[in-house]
Image (tube, rainbow, N blue to C red):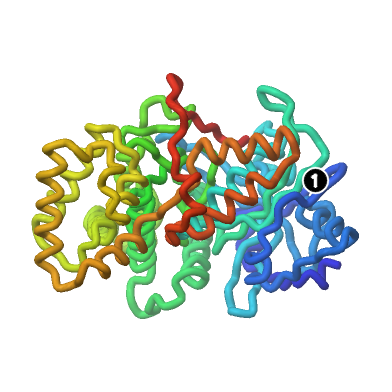
Amino acid sequence: MTKEFGWNFDNSYARLPEIFFSSVDPSPVSSPKLVVLNESLADSLGLKVLASEKERKETAAVFAGNQLPEGSAPLAQAYAGHQFGHFTKLGDGRAILLGEQMTQAGERLDIQLKGAGRTPFSRGGDGRAALGPMLREFIISEAMHALGIPTTRSLAVVTTGDPVYRETVLPGAILTRVAASHIRVGSFQYAAKWGNMEELRSFADYTISRHFPDIDANENRYLSLLKEVIKRQAALIAKWQLVGFIHGVMNTDNMTISGETIDYGPCAFMDTYDPATVFSSIDMQGRYAYGNQPYIGGWNLARFAETLLPLLHVDEEQALQLAQDAIAEYSVLFRQNWLTGMRSKLGIFNEEPQDEALIDELLEIMQKHRADFTNTFRSLALDKLEDLVFFETPVFAKWYQQWQDRLGRQAEPKDSVQQLMQKNNPGVIPRNHRVEEALAAAVEQGDYSVMERLLVVLSQPFVYSPEQDAYCTLPEPSNAPFRTYCGT
């Protein structure tokens, strides 16, 4: 069945020096059941959607790790990372890379089982995952994809039939994750700390070949690698900020070299606009708050640059200067990406020096009046000003006139302005209370229909359809702030 399903594996990561991984098979589970399958993603991977009961059981066996696809070479990747600023040795403690699916379009994509059992990097953990967090990653990662934000994706979730033990006993599950690769800043930190010069160079060469094949072999290719990763991360984090996404755990092991968003444990989307917003239950100091994300991105990239210093130049001082010059560009690139995105959210096609002040003034109004981030821009895009919580305030009247004057200084007509705004302001996001509602129905009642309806709405965030309206409402007021947790 595995061949009939369409697997077409290569295993280039397994051909790297053995320091970078440990070969390990998934641990079998007692009673795998396929509960969610991303059929459109399966189709793009060249995988066949199997409908019969027998075929679904066989498919579940593969996604649970009970049966290995032909051509796979399972392994757990080694990496390190700064977790909340503290460096430590890590690795895939509950995730196993089956291999790299080669698609008809010429893509090479990692297929990874998350929650597939213990590995040499488990550090005392059980290697398993609970159903709720795996469904949560499925929902959020697919919503991010629909929003046009680079992300790992979710192919399937299977329940295992086995319990996992956390604060309580929870149903076990395994997520099949698809990624351009799982190479992280932490992967390079591991290579620099525990590998030799030859192993570090081979890892950098592999990364360039896989993700940046257009880098000129005649230039300083490792400096080019650094600059390309900086560009991708500046663009990615700007996209997060533009939709109010809070990652929650921006450790260096959760920053990919490919520029994809990875690890959807304590993440969430902001409702009320406040740069200090934190959802993660373990982020007591607000290190990874919404407003800090751009700065943490730069900090993480500086750690990446440190790993490349031996490759940048034989002279240590010159290597350090090259790295510092490259890192200095990050804040410039981020600001450019963010400003461009904010202009589009406000229907602005060209550039004027005072645009940043106009944007900042709106954000200040939103913060002062505790306005919802997504709905504020949605109301502006729909020209439904009466829906704004600060609609009748003098400060908004003044800002609105300045905005209209700004729009009047560009050539584009009003309908083009509105089209630009609606293309860049999602009408719907995976609001926390809606996600929790879907998870509760699935985990507690075995009812996946709530999640399925939510996924349909989230798959088209920019259509501004009436079906979205119910998913735009805010949660009931609560004295307790919403909290998310690492899905361990």
Above or below residue 131? Residue 189 is below
On screen, residue 291 above or below 213: above
Rendering coords of residue 1 (x, y %): 86, 67
- Front residue (pair 29, 455): 455
Depth check: give the residue in front, 263 or 46. 46
Evaluate whether residue 320 shows in this view: no
Corner quadrant of residue 131: top right
Which residue is farthest top? 479
Where does the image place residue 363, in percent across and percent down from the top left? Answer: 22, 42
The quarter holding residue 325 reads bottom left
Q: In which quarter of the image is residue 487?
A: top right
Circle 1 crowding by C-alpha within 10 Å: few under 14, some 14–19, many from 20: some
Q: What is the residue that sits farthest to the right in this orientation?
A: 54
- On the question of residue 6 being in view, the answer is yes
Q: Is 267 placed left or right of 413 in the picture?
A: right
Query: Residue 373: percent from the left, percent from the top?
Result: 33, 43
Residue at figure coordinates x 19%, y 50% from the top left:
359
Residue 91 lies left or right of residue 31; in this view the side is left
Q: According to the image, label 1 marks what residue?
A: 27
Q: Residue at x 49, y 45 (%)?
A: 471
Q: What residue type is labelled 1?
A: Ser
Q: What element carries label 1?
A: loop
Instruction: Please give the count of numbered marks on the rendered protein.
Output: 1
Residue at image location 62% in from the left, 35% down from the top: 488
For residue 303, above or below residue 482: below
Q: Position of residue 476 (x, y in %)?
A: 46, 28
Residue drawn at x 35%, y 56% as measured from the top left: 425
| Nearer to me, 95 or 311 | 95
Q: Pick the residue in front: 195 or 403.
A: 403
Q: Say whether residue 13 is left or right of residue 253.
A: right
